[in-house]
Image (tube, helix red, strand yellow):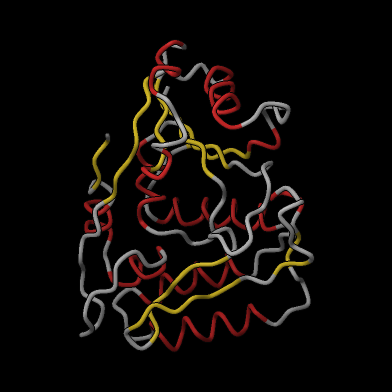
């Protein structure tokens, strides 16, 4: 079995979905500390030809809390504002109608925490992209919060009887292949390619939220984009 373990990000970039698609099981790492100004509740979409950062407001978010303990700011009017921004920015995109309906359903989902919200969003987007990988939250399964860093990742791999672990390229300095090999687990890092695609008539802006890719690419093109990476 091949697995990957990542913190939950909202509407992440294509590389996140390449990773999900490359494994048999994807673990949402939601019982680790929340990171302020990370990608858990923020991402970029295209507005007037430029990257525009959106943020989902949270209630008393803190790096002293676990991700699955951080609640959404329920009474904040962000949902209407965000949907209006998406509508105004993408209403002339080729796949706007279908994609906007999905985003609207995700945004209006009745989650209480950012972890629940993001898990539901990832499942919905994966279904749209025909990615069949099982997605599970670490908080409900592994019960190993006493372990840290690489030791905890290895323990999850062993609980899943995984023989292959894939991590984003940014983790190359965190994980040692020889320690995984001692547990008969192959370790690879995924390196994504920033493949260009038409974004109206603008100069291409890479690494935006998956929202941007879905708005401008049909199913066949998305299938090709999911393959544009290398394992190191």
Q: Residue at the location (54% across, 80% down)?
A: 83
Image coords of residue 45 (percent x, y): 42, 74
Furthest-front residue in view?
Answer: 173
Corner quadrant of residue 188: top left
Pick the residue in front: 39 or 95.
Answer: 39
On screen, residue 3 versus residue 226, left or right, reads right
On screen, residue 124 versus residue 145, left or right, reads left
State the quadrant of the N terminus: top left
**Vertically, is 104 above or below 123?**
below
Image coords of residue 31 (percent x, y): 69, 41
Q: Residue at the location (53% across, 60% down)?
A: 39
State the quadrant of the C terminus: top left
Q: Residue at the location (21% across, 52% down)?
A: 224
**Vertically, is 2 above or below 130?**
above
Corner quadrant of residue 171: top left
Image coords of residue 58 (percent x, y): 72, 67
């Amino acid at each position: 079995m091949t697995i990957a373990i990542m913190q939950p990000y909202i509407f992440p970039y294509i590389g996140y979905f390449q990773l999900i698609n490359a494994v048999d099981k994807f673990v949402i790492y939601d019982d680790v500390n929340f990171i302020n100004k990370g990608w858990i509740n923020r991402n970029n979409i295209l507005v007037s030809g430029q990257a525009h950062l959106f943020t989902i407001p949270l209630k008393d978010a803190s790096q002293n809390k676990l991700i699955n303990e951080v609640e959404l700011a329920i009474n904040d009017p962000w949902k209407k504002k965000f949907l209006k921004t998406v509508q105004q920015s993408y209403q002339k995109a080729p796949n706007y109608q279908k994609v906007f309906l999905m985003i609207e359903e995700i945004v209006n989902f009745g989650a209480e925490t950012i972890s629940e919200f993001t898990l539901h969003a990832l499942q919905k987007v994966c279904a749209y992209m025909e990615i069949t990988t099982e997605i599970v939250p670490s908080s409900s399964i592994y019960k190993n919060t006493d372990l840290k860093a690489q030791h905890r990742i290895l323990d999850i791999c062993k609980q899943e009887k995984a023989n292959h672990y894939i991590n984003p390229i940014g983790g190359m300095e965190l994980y040692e292949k020889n320690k995984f090999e001692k547990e008969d687990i192959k370790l690879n890092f995924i390196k994504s390619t920033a493949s260009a695609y038409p974004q109206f008539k603008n100069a291409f802006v890479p690494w935006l939220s998956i929202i941007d890719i879905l708005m401008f690419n049909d199913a066949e093109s998305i299938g090709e984009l999911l393959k544009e990476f290398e394992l190191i």
